Amino acid sequence: MAIALSVKQALSSSSMIRKMFEEGAELKKKYGKVFDFSIGNPDLQPPPAFHRVFEELAADDARGKSPGSHGYMPNAGYGDVREALAKKASAEQGCRVPPSHIVMAAGAAGGLNVVCKSILNRGDEVLVSTPYFMEYKSYVSNHGGVLVEVPALRNFNLDIGAFEKALSGKTAAVIINSPHNPTGIVYPQSDIAALAELLRKHGEKTGRYPYLVADEPYREIAYGVTVPPVLCAYENSIVVTSYSKSLSLPGERIGYIALSPGAGDAEELLAALIYATRVLGFVNAPALMQRIVARLTGEKVAVDVYKKRRDTFMKVLDAAGIEYIEPQGAFYLFCKVPAQTQPGADGGAADDDSAAGDDKAFSECLKKRLILGVPGSGFRAPGWIRFAYCVDENHIASSAGAFKEAAADWRAASPV
Amino acid sequence: MAIALSVKQALSSSSMIRKMFEEGAELKKKYGKVFDFSIGNPDLQPPPAFHRVFEELAADDARGKSPGSHGYMPNAGYGDVREALAKKASAEQGCRVPPSHIVMAAGAAGGLNVVCKSILNRGDEVLVSTPYFMEYKSYVSNHGGVLVEVPALRNFNLDIGAFEKALSGKTAAVIINSPHNPTGIVYPQSDIAALAELLRKHGEKTGRYPYLVADEPYREIAYGVTVPPVLCAYENSIVVTSYSKSLSLPGERIGYIALSPGAGDAEELLAALIYATRVLGFVNAPALMQRIVARLTGEKVAVDVYKKRRDTFMKVLDAAGIEYIEPQGAFYLFCKVPAQTQPGADGGAADDDSAAGDDKAFSECLKKRLILGVPGSGFRAPGWIRFAYCVDENHIASSAGAFKEAAADWRAASPV
């Protein structure tokens, strides 16, 4: 018996995040309490309105008020649901998105696969700024494409010059993700505008306008900043999003794809998205959750709770002398592996990328103090480490001692 | 802007069933009442126990009794859900299926894509008996495989000799579907045993044992026959099923994959199935529906209602002089396009496949009497037409006159 070779290869270099998950479970079993900041599984409960609507729909169902509500519907989703979400997308994106430009999806992961299936020919390239959520690589290769990594600027913003160099006749799309996993940064409007301008120019020159695919599951988890819109900034843009974070429903697999009102050949692309939804086996986004999220367009989880956790976590890291990127959204803190060389001995080395600390070794060092994070290598950013703060604030606060000790252990040890 | 070429081609030869769906909607708008037997969208309500469990879970949720129940879980599904379904699968399949051999899926369509992704290398072949549910072709080609059609016997049972000829070193799998769409037949145990024997011999000879993939969404919709088990009949078999028909939940996308306890390299294949579930963007089967179906393992829709409809439909067809395959399961009647040649003029031509009636023309003729079915060409069986009877029994009974008139129209017309 044999499995597919590509899958065999992928399994042998299996996801670092999953490995952390398993090791975390073992440590927990052994020591009871572990500071597990490895997995981005939102722990906040859905907002009260979710429970209310859920109960109402269940009651309607039991009273026979909604016959057929678990049956097939058009592959793109219910008409009224698409209408409600088109209004929401229009408000967020600053331009009128018609309901026909919304295709319901089984979460953002489902939506991204649908987009890739719809637009990629064998060998087509998709550009992404590093570091990035490495599942993108699979989503693209599933459908015959090749993910091309474009290094970010040192502040992790988009390096437009690097994108310019990476563009080619094979470029089918660029994926961006803002608020960003793993750094928590939000791309400024000027980055989006510059990227749009670049893609437009590339299209004029080559006749092929790459799609700009914005993966936006964290749009609603932002701290005092508005996430700049994408659909109104570039004609051939596609937003893919989910309710996994904004309503804490990751297990329910519900989200949607929104196509820019200005997209060329929109009708054909929409037909392709709907076809891909069908034949990839999604068929349609789960019926009940479609009906629920359509009634909750004004709701989201308690974002201020995430913000307070972020603030607490930053204090913990400050106290341990660990540098980080201040997150403007999502629920991740991206930290620089501290330097091990003595100050003065090799002055300023810690600021030099070539001397990036060993993130896997630092992660092992943290583990000895029962702290779990994901090494930046898992996002193509060696020398960094990601901590997810979708855990209780007290838990974060109580990790302060462990962080200080781990950082001291690390500094005391010789560089590997 | 451009969509993928493969999708462009698929769209231009778009699904016949979908086309019927749209035409049906137009006819309904125009004439009010239409005898629409085109789509297999189960109209029976889920059993009362479904509504009860649904309401209970919603109430638990509202009272904060199930925190995290909409969050991520292992990609294979909840442990207790897999345990409950392993028991169910064991009872149905006549051998002990361990919980680790169950992977929850987003319906059978999702499950089949996960299986194809897991086992197919580029150019691998998957055999299927014609006629068949034509989405299989997409599920296989999505993952680089090629679907190879193997003509059935005249009674639509498996032609083991034809399978023997079609097997090659490239054969990765055989898909079977019983009860069968579009014919409603149930393969006898002897067919399954003979196919298993053939695959075993092929494996011994070539070193590659093809997987036997049984698509079983209709297993519980059978009339007085037990659908023979597959998992205990062949070591390298995989059952893919859903609750779309047995609980009438097609919109909710819930089902599972069960791997034979005897499968070689089971651990590796299970890891591949779980990996494919993740990277294809399903991530996991919808959480809430997993919890619901695990509590409903003894429940199903009112199958006797489907049986009565089948009986009524057979009488309608008998009265119109239309021949059909008597269905033992599912909710489809597969009918032979009546002969147009005068009896005596070309005696017996109607029994000769080469003289198969034109199913598309017959479908147009039926449409004039406001009857909608799907031409057999849509399943690679020209000369036949499929009627779905997941509609009210009175509606079926009241179509008798229209069927008689259409059949008379057809016989009176000259062959095209």
Image: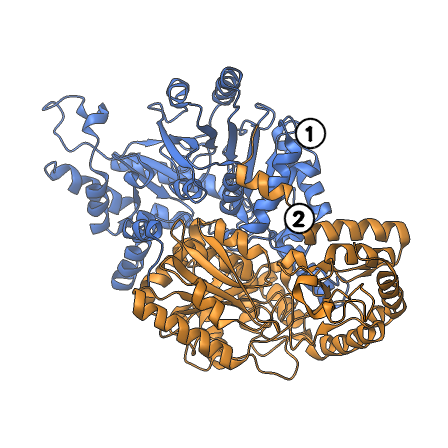
Chain colours: A blue, B orange
Relative to A1, A210 lies left or right: right
How far apart are labels 2 and 1 at the CA level? 19 Å
Residue B265 lies in what quarter of the image?
A: bottom left
**Camera-side residue of B113 and A103:** B113
Q: Quadrant of the C terminus of chain B?
A: bottom right
Q: Position of residue B247 (x, y in %)?
A: 63, 70
Q: Is residue B360 above or below residue B48?
A: above
Q: Position of residue B96 (x, y in %)?
A: 41, 80
- Secondary structure of the residue carrying numbered label 2: loop
Relative to B32, B295 lies left or right: left
Q: Is residue A305 above or below residue B290?
A: above
Q: Residue at x 88, y 65 (%)?
A: B408
Q: Amino acid at mark 2?
A: Gly
Q: Amino acid at mark 1?
A: Arg
Q: Position of residue B210 (x, y in %)?
A: 39, 65
Q: What residue does disc 1 label? A: A96
Q: What residue does disc 2 label? A: A77
**Camera-side residue of A306 and B261:** B261
Q: Are marks 2 and 1 in contact (CB under 8 Å)?
A: no
Dot 1 crowding, Cα within 10 Å, few <14, some 14–19, many 20+: some
Residue B323 lies in what quarter of the image?
A: bottom right
Q: Earlier in the sequence, mark 2 or mark 1?
A: 2
Q: Chain of mark 1?
A: A
Q: Residue at x 28, y 48 (%)?
A: A13
**Camera-side residue of A104 and B160:** B160
Image label count: 2
**Camera-side residue of A127 and A125:** A125
Residue B184 lies in what quarter of the image?
A: bottom right
Q: Residue at x 44, y 52 (%)?
A: B145
Q: Chain of mark 2?
A: A
